[in-house]
Image (cartoon, grey):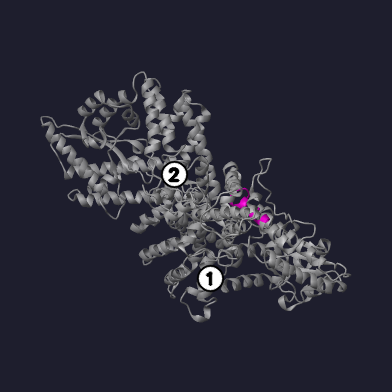
């Protein structure tokens, strides 16, 4: 293996030789270039830490620079000639101290590497001040260094250089705690705001000390505004303030101090922005209390009162600052009574969006649609409106104010939580962007490398089928859509008049403004959405008029889904196919919940939409609750057989008819499933996952029965040949899911007086014709026929005679085959032959005396091997519904082991369905009730998730994503709520299920 590829294991992606130089004997001495491996265990630990940084290459380069700088600084302290960086590190006591501390102190190693990999600016500070790495060391108590934002300025008389260094050290500690998961967003924002307060206070002290001798300290308050006032400051932001003097006598000195504060803070940390003061930059820098009162009473506009919501005394005369706030409070809380107040707030938000450069609007997380400003403006407008009488809403911070709005009932709990999650996500993105260069930015980069860094800095990793950047963008799109959807509750205005082609005098809105509102509703492509709306509502026909009546409600339904554009597009497709029929729009308009049911189905499920676009008339099923109930097995078998019999002379047409009937039944079940947790849209008899599994199995039984008849007509074989299909796996257990293939065995019995070879060839032809017909490409969904559970697996013959099965099972059967036969049942074909097959396997799957000790050990060994070998590469075992921990396979193996051991004596265990067998095991006191309940909960939830993910994606998957629109859609199908909490619930239930399974397997 070459050197670069070995180092690439640690995430070092640049020129391998350069990385080796940095790590090798002339560099950090962590890498043995001869054996191409870390020098020792400490080196391996440090390399592993570097590999986990947001940018391993940046972390390595900065660590190299830091160690080099520390060594050169120590050499200069010992009298050596000053030298610049040479690329080679000369070791001395300083380099040994730093590398030794990194080896001994895991906390220091984690914090320092995280900072070096996430912030080149803080790395530059450490290189310039090579002794400052010690401020990140773990304390003697074992606790990390304080990261509360307190300044530790050296000396009794603070100076600007000392203040600058103290600020950077405090910022370094905050960043380290933030990057290593030591705190959440709110504590980080509070620490940054506290650091700003203390910096303003220190700057105030320096400014006052610099007044001309004999000048009295003025009565001056520094009032924090904006993010600082709300205790939600980010890493790099102007700090908004207003300066308030007590009396006219304080104005001159107060103005000098205020100007000096602005100058000092600009040299130390950030710009101080006093533009929120009365008259803005045109007004005096400092006003008295009385002057402020006069201005706000007479001249202030709504946005200025909105800004005062975040006012908070920060430095100087804090009591004066509090008096100023209290004096203005009555004016703030009456501002909403102005007739233009709500319109002013809306207009201000619109102007902010319009001022974003068009080439940045899609990447702006602060000012763009669905950004931080949407949340802040929504919260602040609600505060202005309701805070007049409810003082609990008078919180300067966005998060506390939003929580107060939820607690007071002004915002729904789910909407409030959605906004909170969106705010936390967007602020976290903002923090990581700013931390890299310590520059003010709110724009997600468009450079692929920068996007990879950002995703890594936010903790995203690649998952099966999606890289880290894709996962980040999926979350970003999801949060922005939800933020826009909720924000529109304040801004929403009629938009359909703008896109309908009606006389100009009837228009109330321009197409441009309608597009903006579509964007706010969550549509990713407003222009495309407008085109769809124009096509649907254009003209003055009756059809257009009905569409204009329907679409306001439908748009809101689409906006509630994770991908609103998809819902509208699918609605356009269905309308294009059915719009000319006399019943379609009438059904939507007059059919009760049909329109809203349709909106939910086509906006949440690609699977159901694909079925509907192939058979639009299936829409009628949504009108009647009775049509959303599964058909009985008998009626399905009769109906499918009748459909095939209509084309008795044409096998291709017959199979097409069977598959079309299956498509209609799959749509019926998918719709019933999608609507069962839709509140008022749910059918009278909602379906659970158990009923869905039985119904899908019945549909498969009917499909196989009709297809077998067609195959036998196409490949007749000798007279008297008997043929049967045995269901296995999920089909045999009545536990089919949407993506399930039909696991089967084919069994035949030769015709009397017919050579065995001839009957075998005929039976094989029937089986192959059946598989071909049901799996061939066609407009209708294929049904995969999987016969891999047959004796000898894929190496064995596809069909066997009953006698051949008997001979094989008597001589060669393994314990795993007995386990597979536990779910075997006759499905279709010759019922007498199927019954004899079931009688034959009874002795195999319910072995007399149960299992031997060796067989139990063999099952446990196979189970362990399956977990290692069958789980797809890069799959998350915690959230894989089929093979993951506590999921479907775990529960099924546990109950099947109990069946193999005890079903010979306990007839109640002779069930093909997992949960029925589990209940029987509880009744027989073979499994504890608590363990059974845990496994039932885990199995049921995994089955629900597996179905929901297929409905949402339109194609099979067993992996529950940790984030993104597919997770959001699946959660919405399963009853809604917070996706993160749903994942936590899944992990909790499957963890308990796994523990219960392990107890059963070890019992």
In this view, 972 is above or below 578: above
Q: Is residue 523 left or right of residue 821?
A: right
Q: Tell me the quarter of the picture where residue 322 sits.
A: bottom right
In this rendering, which labeled residue sits more in front, label 1 or label 2?
A: 2
Against 208, is 142 above or below? Answer: above
Q: Could you tell whether 532 is left or right of 699 in the image?
A: right
Residue 490 picture location, percent across and down: 61, 65
- Residue at image location 14% in from the left, 35% down from the top: 759
- Please give the range of residues in magenta: 169-185
Q: Position of residue 189 (x, y in %)?
A: 66, 56
Contact, mark 1 vs mark 2 (Cβ under 8 Å): no
* Residue 531 in magenta stretch: no
Q: Which residue is mark 1?
A: 516
Of 904 and 124, the residue lying toward us = 124
- Residue 129 in percent (x, y) is at 64, 57
Residue placed under numbered mark 2 in the picture? 37
Q: Disc 1 on helix, strand or loop?
A: helix
Magenta-drawn stretch contains 174: yes
């Amino acid at each position: 293996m070459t050197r670069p590829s070995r180092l690439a294991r640690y995430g070092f992606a640049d020129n391998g030789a350069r990385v080796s130089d940095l790590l090798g004997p002339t560099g950090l001495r962590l890498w043995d270039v001869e054996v191409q491996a870390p020098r020792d265990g400490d080196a391996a630990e440090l390399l592993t830490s570097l590999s986990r940084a947001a940018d391993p290459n940046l972390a390595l380069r900065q660590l190299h620079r830091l160690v080099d700088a520390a060594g050169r600084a120590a050499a200069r302290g010992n009298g050596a000639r000053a030298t610049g960086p040479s690329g080679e590190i000369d070791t001395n006591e300083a380099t040994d101290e730093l590398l030794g501390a990194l080896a001994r102190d895991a906390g220091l190693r984690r914090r320092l590497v995280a900072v070096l990999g996430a912030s080149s600016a803080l790395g530059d500070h450490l290189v310039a001040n090579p002794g400052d790495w010690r401020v990140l060391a773990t304390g003697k108590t074992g606790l990390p260094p304080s990261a509360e934002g307190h300044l530790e300025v050296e000396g009794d008389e603070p100076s600007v250089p000392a203040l600058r260094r103290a600020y950077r050290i405090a910022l370094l500690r905050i960043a380290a705690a933030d990057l290593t998961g030591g705190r959440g967003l709110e504590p980080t924002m509070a620490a940054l705001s506290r650091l700003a307060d203390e910096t303003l206070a220190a700057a105030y002290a320096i400014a006052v000390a610099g007044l001309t001798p004999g000048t009295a300290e003025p009565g001056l308050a520094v009032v924090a505004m904006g993010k600082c006032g709300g205790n939600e400051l980010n890493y790099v932001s102007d700090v908004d303030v207003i300066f308030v003097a007590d009396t006219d006598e304080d104005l001159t000195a107060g103005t000098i101090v205020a100007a000096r504060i602005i100058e000092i803070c600009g040299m130390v940390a950030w710009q101080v922005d006093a533009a929120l003061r009365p008259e803005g930059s045109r007004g005096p820098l400092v006003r008295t209390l009385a002057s402020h009162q006069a201005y706000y009473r007479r001249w202030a506009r709504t946005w200025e009162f909105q800004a005062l919501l975040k006012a908070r005394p920060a430095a100087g005369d804090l009591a004066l600052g509090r008096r100023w706030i209290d004096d203005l409070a009555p004016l703030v809380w009456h501002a909403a009574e102005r007739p233009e107040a709500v319109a002013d707030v809306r207009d201000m938000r619109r102007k902010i969006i319009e001022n974003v450069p068009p080439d940045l609007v899609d990447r702006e997380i602060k000012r763009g649609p669905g950004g931080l400003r949407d949340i802040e403006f929504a919260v602040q407008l609600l505060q202005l409106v309701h805070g007049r009488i409810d003082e609990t809403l008078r919180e300067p911070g966005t998060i506390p104010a939003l929580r107060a709005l939820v607690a007071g009932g002004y915002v729904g709990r789910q909407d409030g939580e959605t906004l909170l999650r969106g705010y936390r996500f967007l602020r976290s993105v903002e923090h990581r962007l700013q931390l890299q260069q310590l520059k003010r930015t709110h724009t997600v980069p468009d450079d692929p490398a920068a996007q990879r860094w950002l995703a890594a800095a936010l903790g995203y990793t690649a998952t099966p089928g999606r890289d880290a950047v894709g996962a980040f963008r999926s979350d970003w799109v999801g949060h922005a859509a939800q933020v826009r959807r909720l924000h529109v509750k304040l801004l929403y205005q009629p938009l359909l008049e703008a896109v309908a082609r009606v006389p100009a005098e009837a228009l109330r809105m321009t197409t441009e403004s309608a597009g903006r509102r579509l964007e706010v509703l969550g549509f990713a492509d407003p222009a495309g959405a407008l085109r769809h709306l124009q096509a649907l509502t254009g003209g003055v026909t009756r059809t257009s008029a009905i569409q204009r009546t329907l679409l306001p409600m439908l748009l809101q339904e689409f906006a509630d889904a994770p991908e609103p554009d998809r819902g509208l597009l699918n609605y356009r497709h269905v309308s294009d196919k059915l719009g000319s029929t006399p019943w379609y729009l009438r059904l939507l308009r007059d059919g009760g919940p049909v329109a809203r049911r349709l909106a939910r189905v086509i906006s949440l499920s690609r699977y159901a939409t694909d079925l509907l676009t192939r058979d639009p008339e299936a829409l009628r099923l949504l009108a009647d609750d009775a049509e959303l109930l599964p058909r009985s097995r008998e009626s399905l078998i009769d109906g499918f057989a009748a459909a095939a019999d209509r084309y008795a002379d044409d096998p291709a047409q017959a199979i097409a008819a069977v598959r079309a009937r299956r498509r209609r039944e799959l749509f019926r079940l998918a719709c019933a499933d999608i609507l069962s947790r839709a509140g008022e849209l749910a059918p009278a008899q909602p379906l659970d996952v158990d009923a869905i599994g039985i119904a899908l199995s019945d549909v498969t039984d009917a499909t196989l029965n009709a297809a077998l008849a067609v195959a036998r007509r196409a490949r007749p074989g000798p007279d008297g040949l008997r043929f049967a299909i045995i269901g296995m796996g999920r089909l045999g257990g009545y536990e089919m899911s949407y993506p399930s293939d039909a696991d089967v065995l084919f069994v035949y019995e030769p015709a009397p007086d017919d050579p065995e070879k001839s009957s075998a060839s005929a039976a094989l032809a029937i089986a192959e014709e059946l598989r071909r017909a049901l799996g061939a490409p066609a407009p209708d969904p294929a049904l995969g026929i999987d016969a891999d559970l047959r004796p000898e697996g894929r190496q064995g013959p596809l069909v066997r005679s009953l006698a051949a099965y008997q001979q094989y099972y008597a001589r060669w059967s393994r314990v795993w085959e007995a386990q597979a036969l536990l779910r075997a049942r006759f499905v279709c074909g010759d019922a007498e032959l199927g019954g004899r097959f079931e009688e034959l396997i009874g002795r195999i799957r319910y072995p007399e005396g149960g299992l031997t000790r060796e067989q139990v050990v063999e099952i446990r060994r196979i189970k362990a091997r399956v977990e290692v070998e069958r789980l797809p590469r890069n799959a998350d075992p915690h959230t894989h519904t089929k093979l993951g921990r506590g999921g479907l396979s775990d529960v099924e193996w546990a109950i099947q082991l109990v069946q193999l051991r005890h079903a010979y004596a306990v007839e109640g265990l002779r069930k093909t369905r997992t949960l029925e067998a589990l209940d029987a095991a509880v009744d027989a006191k073979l499994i504890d009730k608590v363990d059974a309940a845990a496994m039932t909960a885990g199995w049921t939830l995994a089955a629900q998730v597996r179905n929901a993910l297929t409905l949402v994606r339109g194609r099979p998957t067993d992996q529950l994503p940790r984030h993104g629109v597919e997770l959001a859609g699946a959660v919405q199908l399963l009853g809604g709520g917070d996706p993160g909490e749903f994942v936590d619930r899944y992990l909790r239930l499957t963890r308990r299920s796994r523990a219960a399974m392990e107890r059963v397997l070890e019992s």
